[in-house]
Amino acid sequence: MGMMKTEASLDEKAIVAAAEKALSDIAAIRGEVSKVIFGQESVVENTILAVLSGGHALLVGVPGLAKTRLVTTLGEVLGLAANRIQFTPDLMPSDILGSEVMDQDDSGRRSFRFVKGPVFAQLLMADEINRASPRTQSALLQAMQEYHITIAGQRYDLPAPFHVLATQNPLEQEGTYPLPEAQLDRFLLQVDVNYPELAAERQILLETTGLGESRPAAVIDAQRLIEIQTLVRQMPVSDTVVDAILALVRSARPGQGNAATDKNVAWGPGPRAGQAMMLCARARALYEGRLAPSLDDIFALAEPILQHRMALTFAARAEGMSVRDVIAGLVKQAKG
């Protein structure tokens, strides 16, 4: 019994030491990103949280708000091999996954060789994902879920780590194919990208229109990122926080006894929302310089984790309500 206790405390010490090292790495990552991306703190935070938690993120915002620049910057700062795909209506699954080509050697023998597509990257930017056809979207989303692809019966594993940061323009509806609900659920977070604050926009004007632009430096590499992702999963979460996650996620589902939800919500988040909350709350604690997640982490993450996993009733939409309003109400109730 005494032996077990010592082992546990040693293990605890090791986790604390690893977490403190991760804190300084994450602080350095934040510092490098802020050299290139001005303002947009919550966008940068939520996007980095998705990566630290080992997941994918969907960035929603009008053009020109530095979504692509953020992804490119993250690739450089995290030391990841990055690729970018611009989605268009005529894009085919093979344009993402790769295709088989026929080779002929000197003796005239023919054989097939697989040429890898851009999906074979550690950080993949899927630009304007709602402009591609459902067939092409599902090819990417299957790769996101399974971390491998199958071509002509042959399995090819994707690199580790593998993250997709997809962007979507909320205004452009004509000629687009909105992602189905089940596929939106594949994204750990939906990050809303709004217009910059005045001070940040002034900085953008001054910093980005001269001759020299600052370049971010690599702070960590892929191996170190995997170590931090493993640490995130080892961080202890108190019963209070677990109960708060369950209460919040369940309160967003109709038929669970919440009057406002029953009235306004057509369908609510599944268990994946709770899993995402468990991971991201730990990552957010590290990002904010703490060793354990708190209730504040849960309330701050409610909107990016829940908003793409629930839908309003027609009546609620007709009244001009938004999913964000409903989530804000649930958070207010949870705070008591």
Image (cartoon, rainbow, N blue to C red):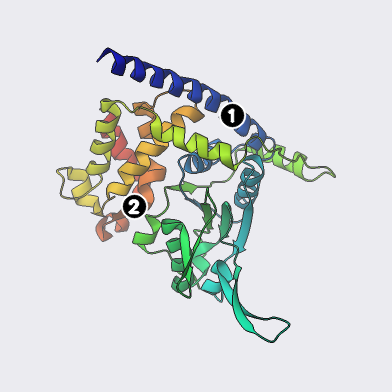
The answer to whether 220 appears left or right of 249 in the picture is right
Q: CA distance from mark 1 to mark 2?
A: 31 Å
* Callout 1 secondary element: helix
Tally of numbered discs: 2
Residue picked out by circle 1: 25
For the residue carrying disc 2, how many other residues have a C-alpha within 10 Å: few (<14), some (14-19), or many (20+)?
Answer: many
Tell me the number on the disc at residue 131. Answer: none
Of the image marks 1 and 2, the number of the one nearer the N terminus = 1
In the picture shown, does residue 133 fall above or below 223?
below
Residue situated in front as seen by the camera: 202 or 279? 279
Residue situated in front as seen by the camera: 114 or 27? 114
Judge whether residue 60 can be spotted in this image. Answer: no
For the residue carrying disc 1, how many other residues have a C-alpha within 10 Å: few (<14), some (14-19), or many (20+)?
Answer: some
Camera-near label (1 vs 2) is 1
Q: Position of residue 239 (x, y in %)?
A: 26, 27
Residue picked out by circle 2: 309
- Residue 275 occupies quadrant: top left
- Residue 78 occupies quadrant: top right
What residue type is disc 1 on? Asp
- Residue 250 occupies quadrant: top left
Q: Position of residue 18 (x, y in %)?
A: 50, 25
